Image (spheres, rainbow, N blue to C red):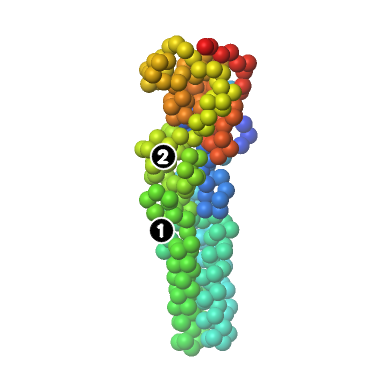
Amino acid sequence: MASHAAGCGSKAQVCLSRLRISEYSGTGIGPDHRARLSLVETASLGPGAAGESCVQGGVPSRSTMKTRTIATLVACSFLLAFLQLVAALGKPLVAILCGGLLAFLASVLLRFFEVDFENAWVAPCVPICSSVAGVAIPYFAVGRDKTIWFAPLAAAIVAALMVEIRRRDSRRCGLCNSRIGSGLAFNCPRCELLACENCWVFERCRCRLCEQNHVPIFSPDGRWWDKQFGPRSSYGRCQLCLGTADEVDLRVCGKCGRPQCRECWDSANGQCSKCHWIVEDLPPRLRDFMAAPNQPERHYHT
């Protein structure tokens, strides 16, 4: 696996040399509306760099992420506790205001270092625990006023308010209405709804609703089909649904000449099931989910 990954380029990649993922190509959208995961495919199933399917911008290993997360949490907690300690050595009001400020500062630091938690209520523990540690040291060591213990309470209140505001403003899946948060999401190219991982059909590059209702994405105008595939084939069968030329509108692949009906071309997102040729005039919203087609000279069969 390591040798295959090295052949795919200098970027962090994970290459699947014997697993075709052409159906899974696409771009996942993170909470910041930026690409979180990009899947692309190549035309060959054999081993070697030129014929491998790669996950570009690969996700770091779990152990690396865990170590990085722990180190970030320790560093942030130490900094926040130090700030609370300094504030607690002054007036109690300053310590309380600092406790509330810690919640905001912790949120900024965790977002800057891209530390995400599956449970949204875990993040407030960082400023609260830091505030408790920063208050406990001067209270027990120097004997400060008891009112400085309101600082952790202020941190808890502000952190809880920030979590609730973030939950209300967080993205929701357009199908199941669940909160997506920092999870992977996709804009469906057919209905343009935002779909979570559970409502996304990866092998079809569409949401579950469009898959169930067979929502088309290509133009119904016959002139568009004539331009992309040439005239309708008058003989043969669709190689996917086995419909005859008399029953369905057959169009042949621009590379290998394999006939497929319009419905099957649409269902496959304009990609040939045999040679993986892709129709040239893809809708813009579908283009990000398909690998860049290598357009050969066309030959039509009528």
Nearest the viewer among 242 and 46 is 242
Q: Is residue 186 visible?
A: no
Residue 20 on image: x %, y %: 47, 26
- Residue 45 in percent (x, y) is at 49, 21
Towards the viewer: 12 or 185: 185
The answer to whether residue 236 is visible is: yes
User: With respect to residue 251, does 185 lie above or below?
Assistant: below
Q: Is residue 243 left or right of residue 41?
A: left
Residue 273 shown left or right of residue 76 in the figure: left
Residue at point 44%, 30% (across, down): 267
Answer whether labels 2 and 1 touch (C-beta < 8 Å).
no
Q: Is residue 7 left or right of residue 258?
A: right
Name the residue at 55% across, 39% down.
285
Give neighbour class at mark 1: few <14, some 14-19, many 20+ (Cα, 10 Å).
few
Residue at 50% across, 31% down = 220
Which of the 4 quarters of the picture holds residue 122?
bottom left
Badge number at residue 119: 1
Task: Tell me: residue 149, above or below residue 5.
Answer: below
Label 2 SS: helix
Q: Position of residue 209 (x, y in %)?
A: 39, 42
Identify the residue at horizontal 47%, vertical 47% (top origin).
193
Mark 1 lies on a secondary structure that is loop
Q: Amino acid at mark 1?
A: Asn
Q: Which mark lies nearer to you, 2 or 1?
A: 2
Relative to residue 237, is residue 93 drawn left or right? right
Earlier along the polypeptide chain: callout 2 or callout 1? 1
Q: Which mark is residue 210?
A: 2
- Picture disc at residue 258: none
Residue 288 lies, with reference to residue 278, above or below; the image says: below
Q: CA distance from mark 2 to mark 1?
A: 30 Å
- Residue type, label 2: Cys
